[in-house]
Image (tube, grey):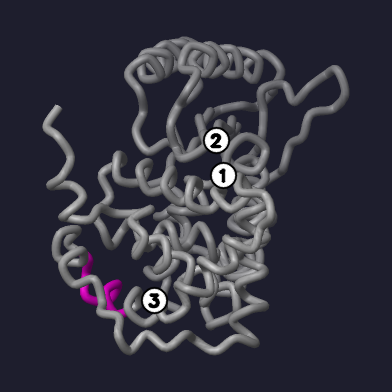
Amino acid sequence: MSKRSWRPMMDLKLRSSDGKSFQDFFSEFFSRLYPDDFIRVRPHGNRGDGGVDGFRQSDGTVYQCYGAREGYVHRIDSVSDKMKADFETARISTRGMRRWLFTHNLTDVPRPLLDAYQEVLTAGRSHGIEVGMLGPQVFQELLKNLDEEDLEDLLGIRPYNLDEVERLPETVNLIIRRMIEQMDVAPPRDRRHGKPPVEKFDYNDIPPRWRNNLTLYLLHAPLVRDLLASFPDGATALIMPDFMRLRYVTRKAEGFDAGGILKLLHEELAGYVNEHDGRYEAAMAVLAAMFESCVIFEDKVAMAAEPMQ
């Protein structure tokens, strides 16, 4: 793989990490980037971590991590206060600190957090400490300094899959696992009389590649419906549609186009795969079934029938 092809994997990895998972990823990333220079830091009892999540010996850089789920800050006041407090704690407790970097995965920096950062900048200047931010753009730029083996370990198939799959609701994972089993033994249903939903493709501006994918995997849509209907508890059968609808509405509100939405939904169900395996096909079948039943994306006729608000 080219280094450029790792960029979307890095983007999704950063957005899907938060809290401790982001700090763990940061520590592993910089340990591989600067193996003889970077020191991981963990809290120690009631002494904590002294406001330090990582330290680079050669230039006295202290890294303080903040990872937000999906790259958005939800408790802005507490994050702003923590930024300022962590800087002050590190300044007092860390001899030789010459540089302090607020290391984050934020898509954009909210204005209140920018104001707090400006305060830290001013405090840093008064003590002769360089202050900066290290965000997703810097992570992307540093990718070129890692070899393929490191990138595979950090962002590749299995590490990513295991990390992301564990985040999915238990029932969603169960449905995917059962789909894998069923697709191994049950042939696709005969859909000779069915037609690809061309009008819905056009209405939602579905890109050609995704039209082909959805049309192919619609062969397995009846299997998905049968599987959902097999759960004795009706509420359980609704978890997958509810989950997919929520994720679709969220991605649409974030401004992704149709191709981007489908790509992210499939990646969320399947993880990144460099080769076809059962989970890839099962996720595609679920995606196609949810599209056909209008759980994700809209039907032109249904939208036209809705009253004006």
**SS at mark 3 in the image:** helix
Q: Nearer the viewer, residue 212 or 101?
A: 212
The local secondary structure at tag 1 comes to loop
Nearest the camera: 110 or 38?
110
**Which residue is painted at 48% across and 66% down in the image?**
286
* Residue 17, numbered label: 1
> Which comes sooner in the sequence, label 2 or label 3?
2
Q: Tell whether position 50 is magenta.
A: no
- Mark 2 packing: few (<14 Cα in 10 Å), some, or many (20+)? many
Residue 78 visible in this rendered orientation of the protein: yes
Q: Is residue 278 left or right of residue 121?
A: right
Given the image, on which type of amino acid does mark 1 rest?
Ser
Asked whether the beta carbons under mark 2 and mark 1 sit within 8 Å of each other, the answer is yes
Asked if residue 208 is among those painted magenta in the image, a careful observer would answer yes
Residue 164 x, y percent position in the rendering = 60, 55
Residue 168 in the image, given as x and y percentages of width and height: 61, 51
Residue beneath disc 2: 67
Quarter of the figure that contains the C terminus = top left
Q: Is residue 173 left or right of residue 205?
A: right
**Among the two numbered marks 2 and 1 on one chain, the one whose residue lies closer to the N terminus:** 1
Residue found 30% across the figure and 45% down from its top? 252
Question: Amino acid type of disc 2?
Answer: Gly
Q: Is residue 37 visible?
A: no
Q: CA distance from mark 2 to mark 1?
A: 7 Å
Q: Which residues are magenta?
A: 206-212
Q: Amino acid at mark 3?
A: Leu
Q: Where does residue 205 sit, x and y in percent of width and height?
A: 17, 62
Reading the image, the residue beneath label 3 is 218
Frontmost of labels 2 and 3 is: 3
Foreground mark, 1 or 3, reads 3
Q: Is residue 14 above or below residue 218?
A: above
Q: Position of residue 203 (x, y in %)?
A: 15, 59
